[in-house]
Amino acid sequence: MRRPYLLAAAAWAVAAVLLTGCGPDDDRSAPDARPSAVGELGAGFIGAASPAPESTVTPRPGSWSGVRPSAGYRVVLLTAGSDRPTRTLVEAVEKWAEDEDVDLRTVRASGADDLLPAATRALRARADLVISAGDDLVDPLATVTPNHLDQRFLVVGAELAEPTENVTAVDWTGASFRGEGLGAASTYDAASFTADRCAAAVRAGTAAVLSGRTGIVVWLDEF
């Protein structure tokens, strides 16, 4: 009789879920074709020529609003710190994900010793995009990102000193921390991390990544 065998198989399946903490719906190790952009960047996001790697573009306000992710887009929010700018960025990412029905998961670094391990945990999720929020993550990402060129990263409110083609950043005057020893490209101003600016930064950055405009810095002094 097959009934005992089926019952045993079912028991093993349940045990596996309990032990690993995830089921088939949580498996991101073998995604389908990478989701793409729905819509196009508007006039004024970039110039007539494609931006060179590591260059800075200053898009026209709202030129990113016509782009959103297709169904099934999967994002990991990698965050560290509890300061107000970081909290505002996190809230902006969460709001964007909710509005666009994005599959969002969050990896939080528990402290200085957990920054690099947290980045590694974010990589293991094999999401379509890893969004970083928090200046403390800049140096760990500078270590990790060149070794994982198949993973796309978006750094919001900061930037890497020497980003590879898989890393896109969104910055503005008052932000742009580039790592220990380098500081910021402008005077740091926590008050510049307003809810509206952070929301625009997330949308502009994700629109750039979805449209294949990666490895650049998107500068948002006006939006």
Image (tube, rainbow, N blue to C red):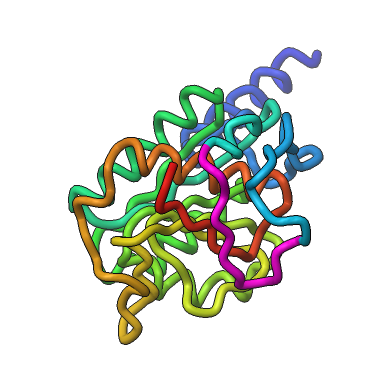
Q: Which residue is drawn at 37% across and 43% down?
A: 198
Nearest the camera: 193 or 173?
Answer: 173
88 vs 151, left or right, is: left
The secondary structure making up most of the magenta span is loop
Q: Residue at x 37, y 66 (%)?
A: 176
All told, the count of numbered labels is: 0
183 vs 162, left or right, is: left
Q: From the viewer's perspective, is residue 171 above or below residue 141?
A: above
**Picture coordinates of residue 57, whole percent (x, y):** 58, 60
Give the quadrant of residue 92: top left
Nearest the camera: 169 or 221?
Answer: 221
Segment colored magenta: 50-61
Q: From the viewer's perspective, is residue 119 above or below residue 62?
A: below
Give the quadrant of residue 189: bottom left
Is residue 48 on the magenta stretch?
A: no
37 vs 81, left or right, is: right
**Picture coordinates of residue 161, whole percent (x, y):** 48, 78
**Picture coordinates of residue 43, whole percent (x, y):** 69, 41
Q: From the viewer's perspective, is residue 35 above or below residue 121?
A: above
Q: From the viewer's perspective, is residue 161 above or below residue 82?
A: below
In the picture as drawn, the residue positioned furthest to the bottom comes out as 181
Q: Which residue is drawn at 78% across and 61% down?
A: 49
Nearest the camera: 14 or 188?
Answer: 188
20 vs 152, left or right, is: left
In which quadrant of the rendered image does the N terminus lie?
top right
In which quadrant of the rendered image does the C terminus lie?
top left
**Picture coordinates of residue 69, whole percent (x, y):** 65, 33
Q: Residue at x 63, y 65 (%)?
A: 215
